[in-house]
Structures are given as structure tokens and as C-alpha cells.
Amino acid sequence: MLADIVLATKRLDLRKIGEDQVDLHWKYLNSEAVMERLGGPRTREELAKKHAKARASFASDGFGFMFGYERSTGEMVTHCGMKRVDNPLAANQGDHEIGWLVREDRWRMGYAEESMRAVIDWAFEEHGAPHLVALTSPHNIGSWKLMEKLGMERRPDLDFEDPGFPAQDRQTIQYSITRDQWENSQCNAPA
């Protein structure tokens, strides 16, 4: 049974992560290609821990990571949402962090942007976030290009090295967007 819908976009229902979704996550969002710049595929146990953490985040903070289901097919296509920065190497622990994954056969179809625009609106409108950050590797070009498209700005002052990643992806870079930047982008959006 699918968990509650938190957000709906034009094509997606973003739902809380349920107790029984490790196998779907493993099947659709844990491939070598999808996880290439994120330290590689995870074990089922690691995915189960991530899911429990997302459910705990919703229970304590009212937000967390979700799965996005394509409304036309009912299939899981994204993993996205917001959490607190919790990397102990980050200078900005506790900031609101957004992130996403899209399954490989749905790449370049706009699902990442669509889901993240909804998450950003939700973060500022419903949760009063003063600003948002997103973390990536400089080699994850598609990721930071989307951050820029979302109106986020590069924050080299927040970069750090994470030895938990392969050598080529140890540098973690951050982008951010403030509430004011987001509000200005809403005022300037085409009608």
C-alpha cells in the first residue's frame, strides 16, 4: 500500500516513504548509473536505514525525503525531498537541504526539476525555511546545472571534503537559495 501523498505536481505524486518500499527503491533508483556520483549503489540494509530516517524526519520536523510516482503509470520515478544537513563535516549542519534522484529510464524528462520546484515551494511556504542548500560533487554536472536552473547560487564557503566518497567525488560543493531569492523568482515568473 502506498503512503500518504505530500505534494502533487503536474505528473507526479510525491509520497512519504512507507515501510515496505526497499525493494522498489533497490529496483528503480539504486543502479550504478543513478548512484554513480553518490558513492555507488547501497545495500538493502542501507536503504532501509535511509527510509527509517526519512520517516523519523517527517515525524519530528514535518518534512523528509519522499518517493515520486508517475501518475500516468503508477511507477516510482524519483526520490526527493528535504532534510537537515547532517554530514558531520559540513559547516552548516542543521540547514534545510534538498536533494533528488531520478531513475535512469526517466532521465531528461524534466522529473527532477518538476519535483524539486514543488519541494522548494513547500520548503518556503509550508516550513518557513530561511534558505535551502543542495550538496553535490563538482563532477555531477547535471546536478549542479539543475541547482542553477532552480535559482540556486554556488557557495564555495560551504564546500568540504568527504572521505566517505570515492576520490573523484570527495569534494562536496554546495548551492543555496534564500527565501528572498525564491520570492523574487516567483514575482518574475511568467504568468
Image: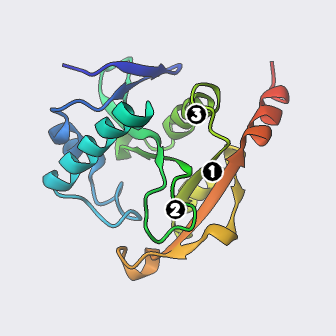
Q: Residue beneath label 3, please?
A: 123
Instruction: Count residues near mark 1 (Cα–Cα under 10 Å), then give few for <14, some for 14-19, many for 20+.
Output: many
Whole-percent x, y for residue 116 in the image: 55, 37
Residues under numbered marks 2 and 3 in contact, where contact means CB atoms less than 8 Å apart: no
Q: Residue beneath label 2, please?
A: 136
- How far apart, in angstroms, are the residues tagged by discs 2 and 3? 19 Å
Whole-percent x, y for residue 23 in the image: 15, 40
Is residue 164 something that shows in the picture? Answer: yes
The amino acid marked with disc number 2 is Thr
Question: Image quadrant of residue 19?
Answer: top left
Task: Write the residue at 59% across / 71% down.
Answer: 159
Is residue 63 something that shows in the picture? Answer: no
Question: Image quadrant of residue 166?
Answer: bottom left
Task: Write the residue at 36% across / 43% down.
Answer: 103
Image: 10 above or below 57: above
Colour style of the rendered protein structure: rainbow
Sequence order check: which comes first, mark 2 or mark 3?
Answer: 3
Residues under numbered marks 2 and 1 in contact, where contact means CB atoms less than 8 Å apart: yes
Q: Of residues 28 and 99, which is closer to you in this image?
A: 99
Check residue 147 in the rendering and tell me which mark sits there, or answer none.
Answer: 1
Question: Dot 1: what SS?
Answer: helix
Instruction: Count residues near mark 3 (Cα–Cα under 10 Å), then give few for <14, some for 14-19, many for 20+.
Output: many
Task: Write the residue at 85% across / 30% down.
Answer: 188
The amino acid marked with disc number 3 is Ala
Q: Of residues 149 and 157, which is closer to you in this image?
A: 157
Sequence order check: which comes first, mark 3 or mark 1?
Answer: 3
- How far apart, in angstroms, are the residues tagged by discs 2 and 1? 10 Å
Left or right, 7 with reference to 5: right
Residues under numbered marks 3 and 1 in contact, where contact means CB atoms less than 8 Å apart: no
The amino acid marked with disc number 1 is Met
Sequence order check: which comes first, mark 2 or mark 1?
Answer: 2
